[in-house]
Image (cartoon, rainbow, N blue to C red):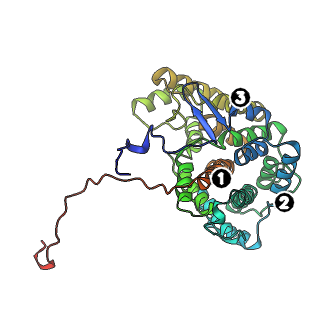
């Protein structure tokens, strides 16, 4: 192709490829997975059903769901070697580095060895996806407890995906409304079109690399605070404010000082993130069961002030931060929870990219100095 197209910085507004996985419709503030509105999936389906939908292109039958869930439960355990690796993680290392390393190590263990031909095969990648869907929560839970100096709790083979994760982290399964709120967050975070981490996985896949390498790249992209991590900053902000009565003035001061306020605005939504109403509802339910009404009060004041002053609405991270906090998770682990969910969307895009692949290799515009010749060493001053 001889014609060159100069794209805007950050590829804003540029369509780089086609996808059947999801569609963000900013004009009506809607998001669909494989054609299904995400808010309806969150209310009516389990996370396991949505994970199946994203990777297999349709919702499962009862029999398909049974087999899918049984396979996920079967694969939850970690090898002795991987457990030893997690036990050796520096306690103060970044949680996303721990998740990235755990996934990379497991990728070396997997008997579905790297092969450029098999890595284009959808079923091979679905098998690898199932392994990661099952093992990433265990990696996170083991590392979570290791950081606290606690012994790991082996996964259950009877509990649901979300129930099992709480059990591995805390040794017990919370009330059904807490599990439901977590399940909803997993569904809402599962997929969001060509975001930075998803695009990263597609770029890596386009080189004919393997699914594990692509996922590790996705984790690296998600670690960046401009992509993942906003829900952590939301909760740090709320803890800094502490009193709902101080929330409005805090926001006014932050806007006046032009501070970066996380949890508001989104590149592809102009009138509010379509996922927010659903997550806000479950955040409010969490507050009712966990006596966290002050976080809801603070949420309302911050949201109202931002909309009133700037016309900018919350994104999904804004209700999710306090919801995870009320569930009992340490703030620095919020983004790894995102990984547990987004492995579904990443894998769907990896499979799609591999099925109709072309190396993603854009051009750049050189703005450095013109061509010059080096001077002999003795003449340089």
- Mark 3 residue crowding within 10 angstroms, few (<14) / some (14–19) / many (20+): few
Say whether residue 41 is left or right of residue 268: right
Q: Label 1 to label 2, Cα distance in Å?
A: 19 Å
**Label 3 vs 2, first from the N-terminus:** 2
Label for residue 347? Answer: 1
Q: Which residue is mark 3?
A: 281
Residue toward you, 214 or 329: 214
Quadrant for residue 137, please give it.
bottom right
Marks 3 and 2 close (CB-CB < 8 Å): no
Q: Going by the image, does 217 lie left or right of 137?
A: left
Q: CA distance from mark 3 to mark 2?
A: 33 Å
Rendered residue at 58%/24% (across/down)? 28
Q: Depth-wise, is mark 3 or mark 2 nearer the camera?
A: 2
Disc 3 from disc 1: Cα separation = 29 Å
Q: Secondary structure at mark 1?
A: helix
Q: Residue at x 88, y 43 (%)?
A: 62
Instruction: Tell me where residue 285 appears, x and y as whole percent.
Output: 75, 30
Position of 327 relative to 135 (above/below): above
Q: Secondary structure at mark 3?
A: helix
- Give the numbered dot on residue 74: 2
Left or right, residue 6 beside residue 213: left
Q: Does the image show residue 266?
A: yes
Residue at 55%, 29% in the rendered image: 26
């Amino acid at each position: 192709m001889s014609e060159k197209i100069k794209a805007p910085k950050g590829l804003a507004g540029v369509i780089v490829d086609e996808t059947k996985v999801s569609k963000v419709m900013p004009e009506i503030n809607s998001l669909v997975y494989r054609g299904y509105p995400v808010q309806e999936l969150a209310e009516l389906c389990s996370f396991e059903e949505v994970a199946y939908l994203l990777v297999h292109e349709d919702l499962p039958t009862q029999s398909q769901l049974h087999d899918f869930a049984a396979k996920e439960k079967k694969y939850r355990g970690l090898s002795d070697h991987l457990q030893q690796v997690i036990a050796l993680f520096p306690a103060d290392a970044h949680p996303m580095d721990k998740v990235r390393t755990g996934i990379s190590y497991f990728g070396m263990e997997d008997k579905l060895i790297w092969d450029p031909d098999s890595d284009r095969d959808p079923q091979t990648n679905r098998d690898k996806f199932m392994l990661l869907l099952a093992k990433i929560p265990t990696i996170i839970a083991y590392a979570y407890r290791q950081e606290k100096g606690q012994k790991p709790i082996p996964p259950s083979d009877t509990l649901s995906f979300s129930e099992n994760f709480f059990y591995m982290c805390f040794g017990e399964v919370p009330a059904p409304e807490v599990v439901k709120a977590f399940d909803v967050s997993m569904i809402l975070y599962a997929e969001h079109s060509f975001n930075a981490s998803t695009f990263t996985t597609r770029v890596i896949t386009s080189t004919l690399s393997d699914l594990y390498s692509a996922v590790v790249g996705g984790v690296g992209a998600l670690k960046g605070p401009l992509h993942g991590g906003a829900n952590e900053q939301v909760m740090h902000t709320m803890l800094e404010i502490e009193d709902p009565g101080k929330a409005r003035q805090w926001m006014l001061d932050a806007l006046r000082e032009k501070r970066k306020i996380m949890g508001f605005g989104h590149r592809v939504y102009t009138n509010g993130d379509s996922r927010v109403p659903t997550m806000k509802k479950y955040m409010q339910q969490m507050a009712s069961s966990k006596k966290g009404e002050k976080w809801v009060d603070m949420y309302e004041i911050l949201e109202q002030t931002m909309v009133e002053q700037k016309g900018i609405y919350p994104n999904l991270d804004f209700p999710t931060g306090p919801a995870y906090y009320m569930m009992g998770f340490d703030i620095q682990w919020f983004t790894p929870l995102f990984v547990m969910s987004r492995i579904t969307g990443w894998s769907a895009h990896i499979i799609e990219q591999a099925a109709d692949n072309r190396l993603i290799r854009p051009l750049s515009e050189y703005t450095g100095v013109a061509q010059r010749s080096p001077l002999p060493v003795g003449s340089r001053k």
